[in-house]
Amino acid sequence: METVWRGRIVEDNNLTVQISTLRRILDHARAEGSCIQTVVGRGYRFVAAVTRVRAEPHPALARSLADNQSPLPDRPSLAVRPFANMSRDFEQQYFAEGVVDEIITALSRIHWLLVIARNSSLIFKGQAIDVKQFGRELGVRYILEGSVRKAGSRVRVSAQLIETNAGTYLWSDHFDGSLNDAFELQDRVAAKVAGIIGPTLQAADLKAVRSC
């Protein structure tokens, strides 16, 4: 744990969660068993065949690597971090994950916006990582993060949009609703968030261009 995360505060089961995520990604459509073998009492072993391929990197990627930072796409790019479950009710974790999934789906319909896949953001789940590092490692300009809190049959979803380079907040708000129809609430929150984020990012990018 110390070698991989180097002093960062992570949950005890974080390694198991990351291995599970890797298996879902690497083993997709794979028929001959998992790429990652569990060695009892020792850890994990990657057992799939590996072929070395020589390829020249894209010029933009080569320049970025020379500068020791992740390349940023030409169009606005955003990642949605897993929303924090602020309730003691573990079932709320499934609701929070559902909200994130619906938000990503809604944002993906914005044709000019590059939205990072959910599995990429899950790599950092449970880690105390600042938004600037998060943005550098995923190569995104913006991050959407949030939390879910429950009180009786009511739930509050809070969300914040952050520009990763400066670490500044561009927008924040919360949405209240009833858990009597969780799916309807998730859809409503996702639609509102996507409807706000689109114009907000357009305005932020226009301001950045004018300041150049």
Image: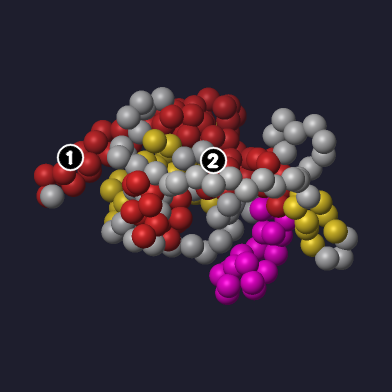
As rendered, which of 207 and 85 lies closer to the eye?
Answer: 207
Where residue 125 appears, x then y in whole percent?
58, 54
Q: State whether residue 176 is above or below residue 7.
A: above
Residue 157 magenta-drawn? no
The quadrant of the rendering that contains the N terminus is bottom right
Q: Which residue is mark 1?
A: 206
In percent of the image, x 55 and y 55: which residue is there?
124
In percent of the image, x 11 and y 44: which residue is there?
210
Horizontally, residue 36 falls left or right of residue 97, namely right
Horizontally, residue 57 falls left or right of residue 151, namely left
Dot 1 or dot 2, earlier in sequence: 2
Q: Which residue is mark 2?
A: 118
Amino acid type at mark 1:
Leu
Bounds of the magenta segment: 1-18
Query: From mark 1 to mark 2, how far is it between C-alphas?
Result: 27 Å
Amino acid type at mark 2:
Arg
Please, what secondary structure does the residue beneath circle 2 have? Answer: helix
The label number, if any, that marks residue 106 in the structure image? none
Question: Which residue is most to the front?
Answer: 54
Where residue 17 appears, x then y in whole percent?
69, 52
Where residue 119 appears, x then y in whole percent?
58, 43
